[in-house]
Amino acid sequence: MIIDCISDLHGFYPKLDGGDLLIIAGDLTTSDRLDQYEAFDAWLRDQQYRKKIVIAGNHDNHLQNGYKIKYGTYLQDSAVIFDGYRIWGSPWTKRFKGMNPQSMAFTCEDEEQLKDQFCSIPSNTDILVTHCPSFGTMDEVYDGLNGEYINCGSPSLAAVLDFCPKLFVFGHIHEGYGQWVRASYKGKKTLFVNASHVNEHYEPVNPPIRTVL
């Protein structure tokens, strides 16, 4: 199965090659206007995939307020089965100091609240899609105040990954774009994909990440 992964579009809609499954991990529009969701839907309609999965990110207030994606399967703490693979999607992230008040969709005040959300992820999930990364994996940002890199992912999300999904797709931390394979002590492997399309300057420089299951 050919899978293309992309996240953090922020209004940039690239030409995609088509395949079996398209996964979009949140932050869809430039400034969260309804007409921009219509533009996203029009772009999504034209993408040549047998299945299109969409979750929300912290910029997607209209999805939290009930906007319906027209041309894809929207997952919000829910699952769908495609070609025998169980796919689970969850949009939640943690709020942080200085966060734009217009970009707080699906955010939690603290890690305990995030834990309540992520503990519902079924252990038989084959493909996990979240907006935020797990702690310690492609989640570093540069803290200019202290002159060091810090991890911004969720520890509670990392804690539930012991079941080792085959594929874990996320975004949110633009600087963390890329992919990495983790082998567990059980001999299972998880492919981690930070599919952020834009970089830390909101420039659409990162291509979709293609993988095969």
Image (cartoon, rainbow, N blue to C red):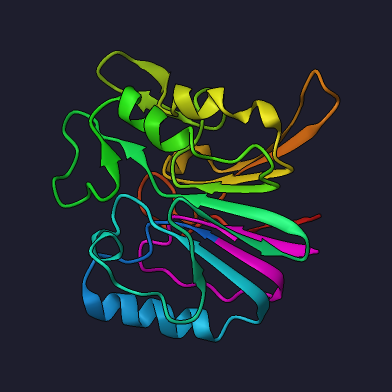
Residue 207 seen from this side: no
Outermost residue on the right side: it is 187
Q: Residue at x 79, y 33 (%)?
A: 189
| Residue 192 vertical position relative to residue 25 in the rendered view, above or below | above
Decide if residue 123 is on the left or right side of residue 20: left
Decide if residue 212 is on the left or right side of residue 119: right
Q: Is residue 79 magenta?
A: no
Q: Residue at x 48, y 60 (%)?
A: 75
Rendered-image quadrant of the N terminus: bottom right
Magenta residues, as a range? 1-23
Q: Residue at x 64, y 73 (%)?
A: 51
Decide if residue 81 is on the left or right side of residue 98: right
- The location of residue 135, given as percent across then percent down, is 49, 24
| Residue 99 vertical position relative to residue 5 in the rendered view, above or below | above
- The location of residue 167, given as percent across then percent down, is 69, 45
Rendered-image quadrant of the C terminus: bottom right
Q: Residue at x 66, y 45 (%)?
A: 125
Number of callouts: 0
The one nearer the camera, 162 or 1, is: 162
- The location of residue 33, given as percent across then percent down, is 21, 72
Q: Is residue 17 magenta?
A: yes
Residue 159 in which image quadrant: top right
Residue 103 seen from this side: yes
- The location of residue 10, given as percent across then percent down, is 36, 61
